[in-house]
Image (cartoon, grey):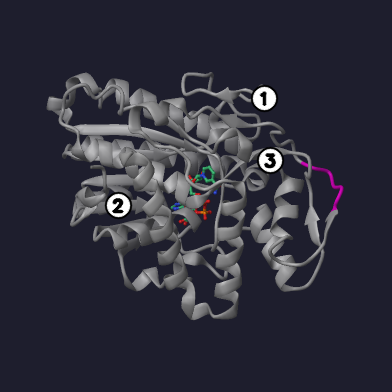
C-alpha cells in the first residue's frame, strides 16, 4: 500500500518555499506531519500564497539568496534534512530575457550550491531538484519529450534549466553515483514538470494570474500568445510527482538505485495539451469576462511543448489525476472562494489537497 507516511517527522528542506509551488508543497508536507524547513527570498508578489497560508509562522526558514553558498551551507548543516526539494529559481521566461545573468546564476549556480553544500557536508540525505519541461532542446514538434532527449533551451530561462539538469547529472555521476551509494549516502533525482496552474499563483506575466487580476478588476484579459500550446496541469499533479519520487528515495534501500536516481517527467495526458486561447475560454466558463489578443514585440517563446510521461508511470506508478476541465475548475474555485473570504485560504487549499490525494492514492494502489 503506497502512501506518504514516510514523510511523518522527517526533516524536509524546501528551497523556494515562499513561491507558488513551494507554498503548496510546504502546506502538503505540513499535512503529512513533516518538519518543514525553507530557504528562499521574501515573497516577491503581493498577495502571496506563502502569506495567505500563514506559512511564515508554521515552518522554520531562512530568508537568503541561493547564490550565497556559505549561508546555504550553514543552513543545510544546521538542519541536516532527510530530504531536500530544490525549487528556488528565477522561473519566468520574460524576466530571463531582461536579466539573463541573474537567471543563470540563480538557476544554475543555485542548483550547484545545493549539491556542493551537501557534498562538502558529507551527510546522508536525498535530493529532488526541480527543473522544467523547458529543459529540452525544443524541436517544435507534436511528440512528447522523453527524459533521454537532448537538453537545450532557446531563452535564458529554458537554457538555464537545461544547464541545471547537466549540473545534476554531473554531480550524480561524479560524487553521488548510485553505484557507490554505500560510500556517499546521497540519492539524487530531478523532476521536470509542465506549465502548472492552481490557486494562489500571483506571478506577473503568467496567464492564470493575469486572468484573475483582469477578472477581479472587471477588465478585459490581455492575451499575448493565444495559439501557443502548453501541457497545462494542476500544481498538485507535479507536487504529487515530486513527493512520490522523494518517497521512492526515502524508502528505497541502497541497491538498484539507478532507476530512481535519475530524471522524471511529470506532465499531463495529451488531452490537456491545449492552446492558451482554450485555457482562457475554459476560465471564462467559471468567471464571466472577456479576452482580447494583444500584439506586442514578443520575446521568443516555445510554441509546442509536450512531455512523455511513460517513465514516471512505469517506474513510480504516477499518473495524472485531474483532466483539463477539473484542473481549471479547481483553480478558479480557489481564487473565487479566497477572494470572497481571505480567511478561507488554508481550508480551501487543504480541501483541494485532500480531494486530490484521495484519487491519487486510489489510482496508485489499484
Ligand atoms: N510554475 C510553473 O509553471 C513551473 C513549471 C515548471 C517548472 N517550475 C519550476 O518550479 C520551481 C518553483 O516555481 P514557482 O512557479 O513556484 O516560482 P515562484 O516565483 O513562485 O517561486 C520561486 C521561489 O524561488 C525563490 N528564489 C528565487 N530567486 C532566488 C534566489 N536568488 N535565492 C533564493 N531563493 C530564490 C523565491 O524566493 C521563491 O520562493 C522553479 O524551479 C521553477 O523553475 C515552475
As drawn, is 125 to the left or to the right of 144?
left
Does 251 sit left or right of 97 as displayed? left
**2 and 1 marks in contact (CB < 8 Å):** no
Which residue is at the front of the view, 353 or 80? Answer: 353
- Dot 1 crowding, Cα within 10 Å, few <14, some 14–19, many 20+: few
Q: Which of marks 2 and 3 is in front?
A: 3
How many other residues sit within 10 Å of disc 3, few (<14), some (14-19) or many (≥20)? Answer: some
Q: Mark 3 points at which residue?
A: 274
Say whether residue 142 is magenta: no
x and y percent of residue 28 in the render? 36, 58
User: Which residue is labeled 2 in the image?
Assistant: 13
Report the front residue among 244 and 11.
244
N-terminal label among 2 and 1? 2
Q: In this view, does 119 lie above or below 149?
A: below
In which quarter of the view is residue 33 placed? bottom left
SS category of the residue bearing label 2: strand
Q: Is the magenta stretch mostly helix, strand or loop?
A: loop
Residue 219 image label: none
Residue at (24, 58) in percent of width and height? 34
**Residue located beneath label 1 in the image:** 142
Local crowd size for mark 2, using a 10 Å CA cut-off: few (<14), some (14–19), many (≥20) = many
Q: Residue at x 62, y 43 (%)?
A: 96
Outermost residue toward the front in this view? 366
SS label for mark 1:
loop
Task: Tell me the mark number nearer the camera, choosing from 2 and 1.
Answer: 1
First in sequence: mark 2 or mark 3? 2
Q: In which quarter of the image is the N terminus?
A: top left
What residue span does the magenta drawing correspond to? 293-298
Q: Can the viewer see residue 145? A: yes
Task: Kindly report the distance in space between the C-alpha atoms of the residues bearing marks 3 and 1.
Answer: 12 Å
Amino acid at each position: 500500500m503506497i502512501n506518504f507516511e514516510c514523510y511523518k517527522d522527517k526533516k524536509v528542506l524546501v528551497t523556494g518555499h515562499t513561491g507558488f509551488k513551494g507554498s503548496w508543497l510546504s502546506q502538503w508536507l505540513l499535512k503529512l506531519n513533516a518538519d518543514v524547513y525553507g530557504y528562499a527570498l521574501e515573497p516577491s508578489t503581493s498577495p502571496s500564497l506563502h502569506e495567505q497560508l500563514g506559512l511564515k509562522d508554521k515552518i522554520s526558514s531562512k530568508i537568503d539568496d541561493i547564490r550565497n553558498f556559505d549561508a546555504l551551507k550553514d543552513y543545510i548543516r544546521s538542519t541536516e534534512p532527510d530530504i531536500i526539494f530544490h525549487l528556488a529559481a528565477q522561473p519566468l521566461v520574460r524576466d530571463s530575457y531582461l536579466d539573463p545573468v541573474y537567471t543563470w546564476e540563480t538557476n544554475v549556480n543555485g542548483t550547484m550550491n545545493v549539491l556542493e553544500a551537501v557534498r562538502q557536508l558529507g551527510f546522508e540525505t536525498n535530493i529532488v531538484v526541480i527543473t522544467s519541461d523547458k529543459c529540452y532542446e525544443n524541436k517544435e514538434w507534436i511528440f512528447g519529450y522523453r527524459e533521454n532527449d537532448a537538453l537545450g533551451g532557446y531563452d535564458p530561462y529554458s537554457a538555464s534549466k537545461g544547464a541545471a539538469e547537466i549540473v545534476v547529472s554531473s554531480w550524480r555521476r561524479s560524487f553521488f553515483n548510485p553505484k557507490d551509494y554505500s560510500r556517499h549516502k546521497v540519492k539524487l533525482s530531478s523532476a521536470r514538470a509542465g506549465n502548472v496552474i492552481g490557486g494562489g499563483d500571483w506571478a506577473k506575466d503568467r496567464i492564470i494570474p493575469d486572468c484573475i487580476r483582469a477578472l477581479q478588476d472587471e477588465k478585459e484579459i490581455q492575451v499575448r500568445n493565444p495559439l501557443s500550446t502548453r501541457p497545462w496541469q494542476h500544481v498538485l499533479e507535479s507536487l504529487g510527482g515530486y513527493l512520490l519520487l522523494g518517497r521512492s528515495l526515502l524508502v528505497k534501500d541502497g541497491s538498484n538505485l539507478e532507476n530512481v536516481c535519475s530524471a522524471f517527467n511529470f506532465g499531463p495526458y495529451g488531452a490537456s495539451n491545449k492552446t492558451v486561447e482554450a485555457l482562457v475560454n475554459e476560465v471564462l466558463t467559471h468567471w464571466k469576462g472577456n479576452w482580447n489578443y494583444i500584439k506586442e514585440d514578443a520575446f521568443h517563446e516555445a510554441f509546442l511543448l509536450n512531455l512523455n510521461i511513460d517513465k514516471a508511470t512505469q517506474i513510480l506508478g504516477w499518473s495524472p489525476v485531474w483532466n483539463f476541465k477539473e484542473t481549471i475548475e479547481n483553480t478558479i474555485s480557489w481564487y473565487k472562494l479566497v477572494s470572497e473570504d481571505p480567511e478561507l485560504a488554508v481550508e480551501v487549499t487543504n480541501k483541494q489537497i485532500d480531494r486530490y490525494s484521495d484519487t491519487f492514492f486510489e489510482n496508485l494502489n489499484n
